[in-house]
Amino acid sequence: FGRVSSNKCYTIGTRAYDMAVRLKYDDIKATVIENENYRQMIDTIISDNTDFVIFASYTAMMDMRHLLIESFGGDEFWQ
């Protein structure tokens, strides 16, 4: 994690706080998005208008993938 260069890092998912603590050990300050509120995370990223990194659990990534594609473009991973 020490190579993360973005100033905007987010954690989301059921273990978001655990990930935030892990990142803290590498001096990375992450914003925890609570309650798996994916729309809030997307809205925050869009309003910040800067590069970002999302640290998500596997299940959170699968749940929010369609919102990321809808908001930022891209293809589903199986296409």
Image (cartoon, rainbow, N blue to C red):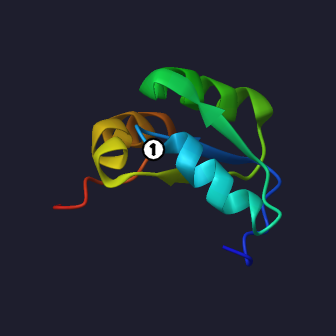
User: How many labels were placed on the picture?
Assistant: 1
Is 27 in front, or is 10?
A: 27
Residue at the extreme left: 78
Secondary element under disc 1, as helix, strand or loop, is: loop
- Image quarter for residue 17? top right
In percent of the image, x 43 and y 39: which residue is there?
Answer: 13
Q: Amino acid at mark 1?
A: Arg
Is 47 in front, or is 23?
A: 23
In percent of the image, x 16 and y 61: which residue is there?
Answer: 78
Task: Residue 16: tell me if it is visible.
Answer: yes
Q: Quadrant of the N terminus?
A: bottom right
Residue 27 vs residue 20: left or right? right
Q: Is residue 2 above or below residue 35?
A: below
Residue 71 vs residue 49: left or right? left
In percent of the image, x 56 and y 30: which residue is there?
Answer: 42
Picture coordinates of residue 34, whole percent (x, y): 54, 25
Q: Residues within 10 Å of mark 1 (few under 14, many from 20)?
A: some
Q: Quadrant of the C terminus?
A: bottom left
Q: Is residue 22 above or below residue 60?
A: below
Residue 79 vs residue 15: left or right? left
Picture coordinates of residue 22, whole percent (x, y): 63, 60
Is 43 in front, or is 26?
A: 26
Residue 29 vs residue 20: left or right? right
Picture coordinates of residue 41, whole percent (x, y): 57, 30
Task: Residue 53: tell me if it is visible.
Answer: no
Picture coordinates of residue 25, whole percent (x, y): 75, 65
In percent of the image, x 56 and y 21: which residue is there?
Answer: 40
Q: Which residue is mark 1?
A: 15
